């Protein structure tokens, strides 16, 4: 079994991006900038944002975090986004989710200039991705895609099963696999006989948020399995895949942690650099 090392792949990608930032700096005499807006003090969000800032600095990006208390009025956030949209030193804007209940997530996402939307959540980017045009691609599915391609470069005609249909993961993942000429089945928590769907797959991407759902007898021995899940249980953090069982049968599998997670942040840096490059054209 190949244990897909996301930590190593992310470190390699960051190294590439570091070189790219330094050549962009020479060419344009400025570096791409990432601005993250963090509202409230949820611990996981604080940790994510700190890691994003640290990685951005590591590859030489300009990085800024704007923090607001969770009582902040929506209009203040929207005004700040509009200001960042106009700021030439800002290549990418990310508003950390989840947001407090009184703030309209859709409104926030749609206020970000699509050309600075490093999350790829703006309807314009969602539409461009589904039409096969150039766009920002959500960081987690992009990270999964790069890990799959590293393991199996030719995905032509492969049968992929995506477990989970979220806007964040399942849907964009489906688009990326379709672009690679996979035959994709989107499944979810209400799918009848998920096991028999998974048994047909050459590639499984599990992003449904159910701890250890995908079992060893759901997986063929040639299958590449990507585990997007991060679930807190009494035995610690586990993925959506039963690692002990599936690692005995699959061709390749990502661990949790150390699989998809590190790639997500590296892809955010990649998206920031890509937004900068498009803006210089
Ligand atoms: N919260 C958890 N994951 C993400 C993500 O990919 N983007 C944003 N903006 N917030 C998140």
Image (spheres, helix red, strand yellow):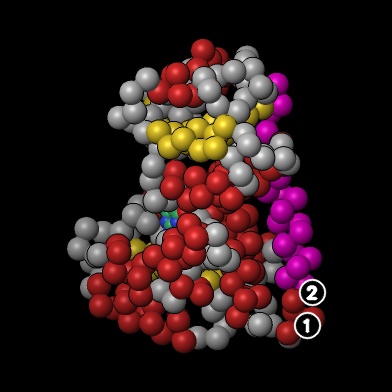
Given residues 213 and 231, the one toward you in this image is 213
Quadrant assignment for the N terminus: top right
- Numbered range of the magenta stretch: 1-22
Quadrant assignment for the C terminus: bottom right
Vertical position of residue 93 compared to residue 153: above or below = below
Vertical position of residue 175 compared to residue 126: above or below = above
Q: Residue 259 at x, y = what percent?
A: 60, 37
User: Which residue is pictured at 74% across the width and 64% down the height?
Assistant: 18
Q: Using the rendered view, name the quadrant where residue 272 is placed.
A: bottom right
Query: What kind of secondary structure does the magenta stretch mostly adopt?
Result: helix
Whether label 2 lies within 8 Å of ligand 1 gets the answer no
Q: Residue 103 at x, y = what percent?
A: 24, 65
Direction from residue 95 to residue 255 in the image, left or right: right
User: Which residue is pictured at 34% across the width and 28% down the height?
Assistant: 191
Q: Is residue 3 magenta?
A: yes
User: Which residue is pictured at 62% across the width and 46% down the height?
Assistant: 180
Q: Residue 42 at x, y = what percent?
A: 35, 52
Label 2 sits on a secondary structure element that is: helix
Task: Say which residue label 2 marks.
Answer: 23
Task: Say which residue label 1 marks.
Answer: 27
Given residues 10 and 248, the one toward you in this image is 248
Vertical position of residue 39 compared to residue 116: above or below = above
Label 1 sits on a secondary structure element that is: helix
């Amino acid at each position: 079994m190949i244990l897909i090392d996301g930590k190593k792949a992310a470190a390699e990608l960051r190294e590439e991006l570091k070189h790219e930032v330094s050549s962009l700096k020479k060419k344009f005499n400025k570096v791409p900038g990432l601005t993250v807006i963090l509202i409230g003090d949820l611990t996981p969000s604080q940790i994510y944002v700190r890691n994003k800032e640290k990685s951005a600095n590591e590859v030489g990006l300009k990085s800024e975090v704007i923090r607001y208390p969770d009582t902040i009025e929506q209009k203040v956030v929207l005004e700040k986004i509009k200001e960042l949209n106009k700021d030439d030193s800002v290549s990418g804007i990310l508003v950390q989710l989840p947001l407090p209940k009184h703030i309209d997530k859709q409104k926030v996402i749609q206020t970000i200039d699509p050309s600075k939307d490093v999350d790829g959540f703006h309807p314009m980017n969602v539409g461009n991705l589904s039409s096969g045009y150039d766009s920002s691609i959500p960081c987690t599915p992009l990270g999964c895609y790069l890990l799959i391609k590293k393991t199996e470069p030719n995905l032509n005609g492969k049968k992929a099963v995506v477990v989970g249909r979220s806007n964040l993961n399942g849907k964009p993942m489906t688009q990326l696999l379709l672009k690679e000429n996979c035959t994709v089945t989107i499944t979810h928590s209400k799918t009848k006989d998920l096991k028999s769907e998974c048994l047909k797959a050459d590639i499984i991407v599990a992003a449904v948020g159910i701890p250890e759902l995908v079992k060893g007898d759901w997986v063929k021995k040639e299958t590449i399995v990507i585990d997007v899940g991060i679930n807190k249980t009494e035995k610690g953090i586990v993925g959506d895949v039963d690692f002990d069982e599936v690692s005995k049968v699959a061709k390749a599998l990502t661990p949790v942690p150390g699989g998809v997670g590190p790639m997500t942040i590296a892809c955010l840096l990649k998206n920031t650099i890509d937004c900068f490059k498009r803006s210089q054209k």
